[in-house]
Image (cartoon, coloured by chain):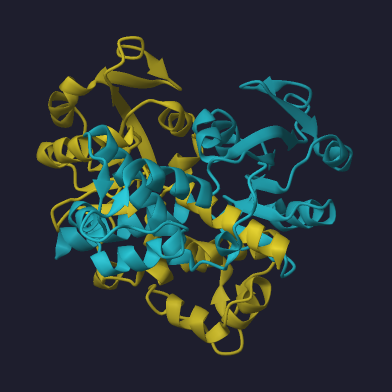
Chain colours: A yellow, B cyan
Amino acid sequence: MEQPLQPKDYQKVPEPTLRRLPWYLSNVKLLKQRGEHFVSSTQISKEINIDASQIAKDLSYVNISGRTRVGYEVDTLIDVLESFLGFTNIHKAFLFGVGSLGGALLQDSGLKHFGLEIVAAFDIDPALVGTTLNGIPIYHSDEFVDKMNEYDVQIGVLTVPIEIAQSVTDMMVAGGLNAVWNFTPFRIRVPEHIVVQNTSLYAHLAVMFNRLNFNKIK
Amino acid sequence: MEQPLQPKDYQKVPEPTLRRLPWYLSNVKLLKQRGEHFVSSTQISKEINIDASQIAKDLSYVNISGRTRVGYEVDTLIDVLESFLGFTNIHKAFLFGVGSLGGALLQDSGLKHFGLEIVAAFDIDPALVGTTLNGIPIYHSDEFVDKMNEYDVQIGVLTVPIEIAQSVTDMMVAGGLNAVWNFTPFRIRVPEHIVVQNTSLYAHLAVMFNRLNFNKIK
């Protein structure tokens, strides 16, 4: 938290690069487990079948330099990537909608290892309000603005039914949240300065089903 | 299940189209709730801020034709989209790795509404093997090949630690699964005929964190 900000960390890195960097990170972690001390982009390339020049280009966004013939130091590369990707700082979040998926996410403690801590959830179901799930308190949605003063939160996780996806988003934005992690299949509208990340499990299922059927009749 | 296959359903639809179609579906469902009987691509376009011509093009992959000035019939469009996207047929799946995320997915009954039913899970932890979670039995990984004969399963959901992501994938493929829904941040390698869909929650977090920081210093 107290490290000086590296300006380079905050350029607008292309989304495809940001999505590939975690692949390199997990791969380098594996190489470390195998006892490697140095790794080159050529080595990563062989393991994960991405062009070495693409890997070198992606890594150029990160503040690390490799040494000719030797490559990147494994420990340093892991530290720098984890920090660059934001996994080493805890970002607090509220979750909206403790249904099946919302409840599941509250129980996934793994998110915390990647920098996301859901500190409270909101719902309107009287059977849920006032209870906790995996130690996380569930409040009534009406308490959201109060809780914004109590917790230091920037991110909202959206797992409500599609009928209220937009109105809950509007409420989140009005309350001062800066990012929405949207798990609904609904395309929400937000002001330009709000960060949205769409993770629709159902869209991924649609792609998978289509490809399976395509292979079957090919 | 007994409907004749429409050849058009099984062309290789572009992935961006497949990812946008669920947006249209959820939007049309909302319009239906509001009492609309017909919907045009212009109307959907206004709601979700995607070009009307793009929407019409995406919908041209689906077996439905709109009427000039009136548009698509809402009920028909919902049925045809749900069926086209594979949400109305149940696709059975095995899940590998009942850790934090795997356990969470077993508890997300919502997947079934979109055509995916996880019928069994595999792990090696003696504390888990032989138990059930949300009614789903957890078997020892050694039993996988036996269970392939018992269940009619094509899809494997991968939620194991990265160290064994590749070896478990190899086992899944050797056992006859045709698709891998990969939730690990590891880039798995598979033979060409195997369908892979990567859903890395951590990669999405990385994008969100980076955009948040970028907005902060902008």
- Quarter holding residue B174: bottom right
Q: Which residue is pictured at 57% across the width and 83% down the height?
A: A52
On the rendered structure, is A140 left or right of A53?
A: left
Q: Which residue is pictured at 62% across the width and 82% down the height?
A: A42
* A40 over B218 or under it: above or below: below
- Quarter holding residue B129: top right
Question: Front-most of B204 and A208?
Answer: A208
Image spot of residue A162 (x, y percent):
31, 37
Q: Which residue is pictured at 56% across the width and 59% down the height?
A: B9
* B212 over A92 or under it: above or below: below
On the rendered structure, is A71 left or right of A176?
A: right
- Quarter holding residue A160: top left
Image spot of residue B63 (x, y percent):
47, 58
On the rendered structure, is A52 left or right of A174?
A: right
Question: Which residue is situated farthest in the left direction here?
Answer: A174
Question: Front-most of B72 and B162?
Answer: B72
On the rendered structure, is A35 left or right of A122?
A: right
Q: Is residue B51 visible?
A: no
Image spot of residue A154 (x, y percent):
22, 43
